[in-house]
Image: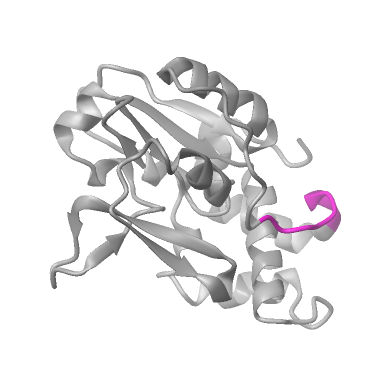
């Protein structure tokens, strides 16, 4: 999301508290339209100036930093939502269980990962690091809002950009036990290998 009034860009990879943050910032960001996704229990949005090649509005909730105007990336404050990869995978899995009405004893975490391994176009496979890539010379250092510290980090962000403090809503959240309870050695190894860049770059560890 981008706000020209407060001069910031917020990058939001999926399943990182994106819907909650997007809802909270909708009033101050530049949004040209809403794409309600009722079957998924969420929404996407369009931003002026960003269209598909056929002229249709382009969904922008999970836009990458590199997709924004170079001048804005260089001059605006930059923020991003991040999450422990092991926790994030569980959130993806539980989301699929809920909206595809699947039985977790049959559609296990392992089956979920194996199915997604066959679909490289799946948005969840994209490294969080890749969402934040830019070759621009930025005036401000990219700051992160960590999912495990969401409320406190979001308030700091509000103070930073001059917004009234906003209490984050809890939207499109998945209910589950602590993520460590769903893993075995095999599934943990898959996630460790597949999301190695994110785990190393953001300093996450299993169980934290």
Instruction: Write the residue at 63% across / 62% down.
Output: 92
Q: Is residue 186 above or below residue 118?
A: above
Q: Nearer the viewer, residue 145 or 3?
A: 3
Residue 140: image location, x then y, percent: 32, 18
**Residue pictured at 38% horizontal, 45% vertical:** 131
Corner quadrant of residue 111: bottom right
Colour convention: one colour
From the image, which quarter does the N terminus lie in? Answer: top left
Q: Residue at x 80, y 81 (%)?
A: 103
Q: Quadrant of residue 112?
A: bottom right
Q: Nearer the viewer, residue 3 or 125?
A: 3
Please identify the quadrant where the C terminus is shown.
top right
- The segment highlighted magenta reads 173-181
**Residue 178 sits inside the magenta stretch:** yes
Q: Position of residue 2 (x, y in %)?
A: 32, 38
Name the image quarter holding residue 138.
top left
Residue 32: percent from left, percent from top: 28, 53
Does residue 207 appear left or right of residue 46 in this picture? right
């Amino acid at each position: 999301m981008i706000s020209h009034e407060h001069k910031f860009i917020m990058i939001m990879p999926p399943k990182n508290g994106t819907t909650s943050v997007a809802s909270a910032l909708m009033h101050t960001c530049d949004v040209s339209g809403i794409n309600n996704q009722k079957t998924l229990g969420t929404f996407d949005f369009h931003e002026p100036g960003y269209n598909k090649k056929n002229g249709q509005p382009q969904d922008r909730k999970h836009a990458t930093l590199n997709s924004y105007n170079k001048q804005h990336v260089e001059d605006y404050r930059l923020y991003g939502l991040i999450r422990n990869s092991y926790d994030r995978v569980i959130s993806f899995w539980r989301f699929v269980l809920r909206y595809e009405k699947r039985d977790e004893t049959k559609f296990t975490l392992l089956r979920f990962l194996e199915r997604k391994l066959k679909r490289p176009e799946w948005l969840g496979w994209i490294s969080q690091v890749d969402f934040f890539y830019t070759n621009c010379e930025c005036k401000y250092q990219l700051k992160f809002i960590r999912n495990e510290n969401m409320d406190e980090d979001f308030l700091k962000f509000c103070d930073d950009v001059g917004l009234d403090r906003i209490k984050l809503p809890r939207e499109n959240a998945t209910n589950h036990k602590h993520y460590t309870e769903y893993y075995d050695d095999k599934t943990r190894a898959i996630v460790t290998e597949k999301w190695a860049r994110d785990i190393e770059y953001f300093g996450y560890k299993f169980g934290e």
